[in-house]
Image (cartoon, rainbow, N blue to C red):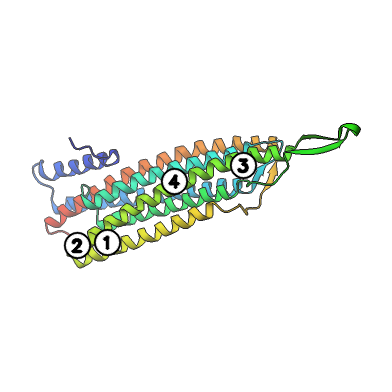
C-alpha cells in the first residue's frame, strides 16, 4: 500500500472535506456561498502565512545571536574544552535541521512530479527556494563555527623548569601543549564530520544534476526544458559551492576569539541550553503551522476551482 508523507495527511483530509461538501451534500453550494468560503479561507491562509514569516524571523534572529556569540569565544586552561563542546554540539544540532529541511524539500519536489495537493507549481517552487535558502544558511553557520575552533599550535610536549646540577635540566609537561591537544581533538572531530556531510551533499547533488540532464534530453515542451535547465544550473552551482566549502574547511582558522574562564563558560552553556529548548519548541510550532498552511492553501484552491466551475470569479 502506498504510504504518503505524514505532513500531507492533514491536507488530504481537508481536500476530502471540501470535496464532500461540494459533491455529497444536497443542494450544491451556490456561487455566493463559494465566494464567501473563498474569502474566509483566503483570510486564514494570509494569517497563517504571516504567522509563519514572523516565527521564522524570530528563529533566525535568535540563531544569529547564538552563532555570533559562540564564534567570538574560545577555551582557556580553566575551561579546558567546555566552549569547544558547545560549538561541536551546536554544529550537530544545525546539521539535524538541515536534514529536516531536506525532508520537507524532497516532499515538495515529489509534489511537483506527482501532485496530490491543489497547489500551483510556482507556489511549490517558491517554498523549495525558501528551504534551499535555509539549508545554505545552516551550512554557512556550521562552517563559521568550525572556523572559530582552535587549530593546531606548535608547543613542546615538555618544558624546562630549571637545572638539577649533576643530573642535568629538569622538565615538566607543558600545559600549553596539553590544552591545545584537548581543544584540537574537538576541532578535528567536527571538521571530519563536516567534510563527510559536504561529500554526501556533493554526491546527492551530482545524482540530481544527472537526473535533470536526462529529463532535459527527454522533454518536448520548451517551457519544461527551460525550467529543468534552470534547475540544473542551480544544482551545478551548488555543487561548485560545496566543493569550495570543502576546501575552505581544511584551511587554518583565522577567526579572532577571546578565552573565557570556567565560570563564564558554564554560564554560557546554561544560557545556551535554555535558548536551544526555546528554539526547539518554536521550530516545532513553525512546522505545525507550515503543515496547516499547506492544507489550508490546497483547500482554498479547491474552493476557487469549484467557484470557477460555476462561472464565478
Asked if the residue at tag 1 contacts the one at tag 2, i.e. Cβ–Cβ closer than 8 Å, the answer is yes
Quarter of the image that includes the N terminus: top left
- Between the C-alphas of marks 2 and 4, the distance is 33 Å
Q: Quadrant of residue 289?
A: top left
Residue labelled with disc 2: 219
Q: Earlier in the sequence, mark 2 or mark 1?
A: 2
Q: Earlier in the sequence, mark 1 or mark 3?
A: 3
Label 2, residues with CA under 10 Å away: few <14, some 14-19, many ≥20: some
Say if 277 sits above or below 145 in the image. Answer: above
Q: Secondary structure at mark 1?
A: helix
**In the foreground, 117 or 302:** 117
Label 4, residues with CA under 10 Å away: few <14, some 14-19, many ≥20: some
- Between the C-alphas of marks 4 and 3, the distance is 20 Å
Quarter of the image that includes the C terminus: bottom left
Residue labelled with disc 3: 184
Q: Earlier in the sequence, mark 2 or mark 4?
A: 4
Q: Secondary structure at mark 3?
A: helix
- Between the C-alphas of marks 2 and 3, the distance is 51 Å
Q: Secondary structure at mark 4?
A: helix
- The picture places residue 213, in percent across and down from the top left corner, at 27, 60
- Between the C-alphas of marks 1 and 3, the distance is 44 Å
Residue labelled with disc 1: 228
Say if 163 sits above or below 241 in the image. Answer: above
- The picture places residue 224, in percent across and down from the top left corner, at 22, 63
Asked if the residue at tag 4 contacts the one at tag 2, i.e. Cβ–Cβ closer than 8 Å, the answer is no
| Left or right position of 142 against 203 | right
**Residue visible at 45% across and 37% down in the picture:** 281
Q: Earlier in the sequence, mark 4 or mark 1?
A: 4
Amino acid at each position: 500500500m502506498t504510504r504518503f508523507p505524514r505532513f500531507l495527511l492533514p491536507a488530504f483530509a481537508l481536500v476530502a472535506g471540501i470535496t464532500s461538501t461540494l459533491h455529497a451534500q444536497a443542494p450544491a453550494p451556490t456561487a455566493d456561498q463559494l465566494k464567501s468560503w473563498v474569502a474566509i479561507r483566503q483570510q486564514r491562509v494570509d494569517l497563517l502565512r504571516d504567522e509563519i514569516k514572523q516565527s521564522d524571523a524570530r528563529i533566525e534572529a535568535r540563531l544569529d545571536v547564538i552563532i555570533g556569540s559562540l564564534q567570538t569565544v574560545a577555551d582557556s586552561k580553566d575551561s579546558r574544552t567546555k566552549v569547544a563542546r558547545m560549538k561541536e554540539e551546536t554544529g550537530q544540532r544545525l546539521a539535524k535541521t538541515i536534514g529536516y529541511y531536506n525532508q520537507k524539500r524532497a516532499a515538495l519536489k515529489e509534489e511537483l512530479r506527482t501532485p496530490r495537493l491543489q497547489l500551483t507549481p510556482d507556489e511549490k517552487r517558491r517554498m523549495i527556494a525558501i528551504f534551499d535558502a535555509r539549508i545554505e544558511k545552516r551550512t554557512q553557520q556550521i562552517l563559521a563555527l568550525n572556523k572559530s575552533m582552535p587549530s593546531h599550535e606548535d608547543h613542546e610536549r615538555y618544558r624546562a623548569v630549571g637545572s638539577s646540577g649533576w643530573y642535568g635540566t629538569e622538565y615538566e609537561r607543558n600545559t600549553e601543549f596539553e590544552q591545545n591537544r584537548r581543544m584540537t581533538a574537538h576541532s578535528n572531530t567536527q571538521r571530519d564530520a563536516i567534510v563527510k556531510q559536504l561529500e554526501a551533499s556533493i554526491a546527492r547533488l551530482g545524482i540530481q544534476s544527472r537526473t535533470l540532464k536526462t529529463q532535459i534530453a527527454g522533454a518536448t515542451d520548451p517551457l519544461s526544458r527551460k525550467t529543468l535547465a534552470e534547475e540544473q544550473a542551480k544544482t551545478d552551482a551548488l555543487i561548485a559551492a560545496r566543493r569550495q566549502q570543502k576546501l575552505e574547511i581544511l584551511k587554518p582558522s583565522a577567526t579572532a576569539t577571546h578565552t573565557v574562564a570556567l565560570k563564564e563558560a558554564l554560564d554560557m552553556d546554561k544560557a545556551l541550553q535554555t535558548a536551544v529548548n526555546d528554539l526547539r519548541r518554536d521550530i516545532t510550532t513553525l512546522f505545525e503551522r507550515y503543515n496547516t498552511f499547506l492544507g489550508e492553501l490546497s483547500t482554498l484552491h479547491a474552493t476557487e476551482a469549484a467557484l470557477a466551475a460555476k462561472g464565478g470569479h
